């Protein structure tokens, strides 16, 4: 029994002061239900990807989905949390329920409200998604963790500050075409590669342009049993899914190996009976530019230390042989934690149905989605294809 995406909704990402979490959840839920052409009464169950961690007081928010439509009343609703991969975790949970036969139509929402607290509090909350006793409790933040990973990469393979700037510039250029993106402005390589008042060092060697944005936002999907797919105008099939979790402490891992993402990609590609170059494009988790660079290597596009070549040769550019983050990624689109994994599946589905507007790639057939929680701890890879 397979699973298909048959509808979706997506809010703008950014500082959305006029929209609280409940409003965001209800908005995208209605959009997804309407887009799929079903009624709320036909939904069997709902899942919500959401981190929160104290950024807003609403810690019990799964039933906020029911606020979208009275037809959702009495439906099971569950909140799912797996750090920055909470969105993909909610998607996978719904897929598993459909595959188990306990649900035929699922509504999946990812949502986060991050901008209601000061930046220092956001940094503290997100830092607590690390291995606290060895990392957050000792003053390490996620910029600090990924800066440490970048420094190790530079020590082993040479200074790749310019490579990271190329990734940032690429994704910001792509984000100009994304109507949902928080930052629709091409910053250019020189700006991203230059330390300045507007682009300071956040945690050496990472600059501001190497770090994803703090965002509010939400996205939603309607998933159905594949046997129902013929009843919908379009259906995006999960050809493969893989989840791999690694040890939480960095001290128990070799960070540059990106072994969790590497295994998740390998499992998904084997399940899909394809190789990475068979994919038309990928949406990957660029919480920091070093994470996208390591993702190139983890998915098997290039050997360790060789990721820069994909940029200089143009392979991962929008018009290249293997576009990565044509949406602008987390760098330009924004990163409302719980929404990110759901958003990636929405944007990949738009590409595969030819409905991505200015973002549209020429005739994509197979998409890869990689959503990551923590420093490569919770790793989710989906391979998607258009069924109809």
Image (cartoon, helix red, strand yellow):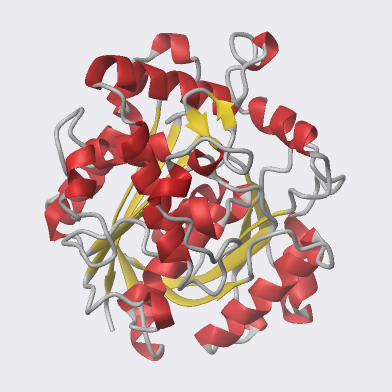
Picture layout, residue 183 above or below residue 193: below
Write the residue at 60% across / 14% down: 135
Q: Where residue 282 sits: x, y (%)?
A: 30, 57
Q: Where residue 146 sits: x, y (%)?
A: 48, 26
Q: Is residue 117 visible?
A: yes
Write the residue at 59% across / 9% down: 134
Write the residue at 78% across / 53% down: 61
Left or right, residue 378 beside residue 323:
right
Q: Quadrant of the C terminus?
A: bottom left
Left or right, residue 186 beside residue 76:
left
Left or right, residue 376 beside residue 312:
right
The one of 200 and 277 positioned closer to us in this rendering? 200
Left or right, residue 312 beside residue 326:
left
Picture layout, residue 260 above or below residue 315: above
Q: Quadrant of the N terminus?
A: bottom left
Q: Is residue 74 visible?
A: no
The one of 47 and 308 positioned closer to us in this rendering? 308
Number of numbered markers: 0
Picture layout, residue 186 above or below residue 147: below
Q: In which image quadrant can residue 345 be found?
A: bottom left
């Amino acid at each position: 029994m397979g699973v298909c995406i048959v509808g979706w909704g997506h809010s703008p990402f950014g500082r959305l002061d006029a929209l609280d979490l409940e409003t965001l959840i209800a908005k995208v839920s209605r959009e997804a239900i309407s887009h799929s052409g079903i009624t709320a009464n036909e939904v069997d169950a709902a899942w919500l990807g959401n981190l929160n961690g104290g950024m807003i007081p609403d810690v019990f928010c799964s039933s906020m989905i029911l606020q979208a439509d009275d037809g959702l009343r009495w439906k099971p609703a569950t909140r799912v949390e797996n750090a920055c991969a909470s969105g993909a975790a909610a998607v996978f949970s719904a897929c598993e329920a459909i595959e188990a036969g306990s649900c035929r139509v699922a509504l999946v929402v990812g949502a986060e409200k991050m901008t209601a607290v000061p930046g220092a509090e956001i940094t503290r909350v997100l830092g607590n998604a690390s291995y606290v006793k060895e990392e957050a409790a000792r003053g390490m933040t996620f910029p600090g963790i990924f800066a440490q990973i970048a420094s190790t990469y530079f020590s082993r393979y040479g200074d790749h500050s310019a490579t990271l700037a190329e990734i940032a510039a690429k994704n910001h250029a792509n984000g100009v075409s994304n109507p949902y993106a928080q930052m629709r402005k091409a910053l250019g390589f020189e700006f991203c590669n230059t330390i300045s008042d507007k682009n300071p060092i956040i945690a050496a060697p990472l600059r501001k342009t190497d770090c994803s944005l703090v965002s509010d936002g939400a996205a939603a999907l309607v998933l159905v049993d594949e046997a129902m797919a013929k009843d919908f105008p379009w259906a995006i099939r999960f050809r493969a899914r893989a989840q791999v979790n690694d040890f939480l402490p960095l001290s128990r891992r070799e960070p540059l190996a990106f072994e969790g993402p590497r295994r998740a990609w390998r499992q998904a590609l084997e399940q899909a009976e394809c190789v990475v170059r068979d994919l038309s494009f990928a949406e990957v988790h660029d919480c920091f530019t070093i994470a996208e660079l390591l993702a190139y290597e983890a998915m098997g596009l290039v050997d360790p230390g060789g990721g820069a070549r994909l940029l200089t040769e143009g392979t991962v550019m929008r018009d290249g042989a293997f576009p990565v983050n044509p949406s602008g990624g987390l760098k330009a689109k924004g990163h409302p934690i719980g929404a990110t994994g759901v958003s990636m599946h929405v944007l990949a589905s738009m590409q595969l149905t030819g409905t991505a507007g200015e973002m549209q790639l020429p005739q994509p057939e197979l998409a890869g989605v990689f959503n990551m929680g923590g420093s490569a701890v919770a790793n989710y890879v989906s391979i998607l294809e258009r069924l109809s």
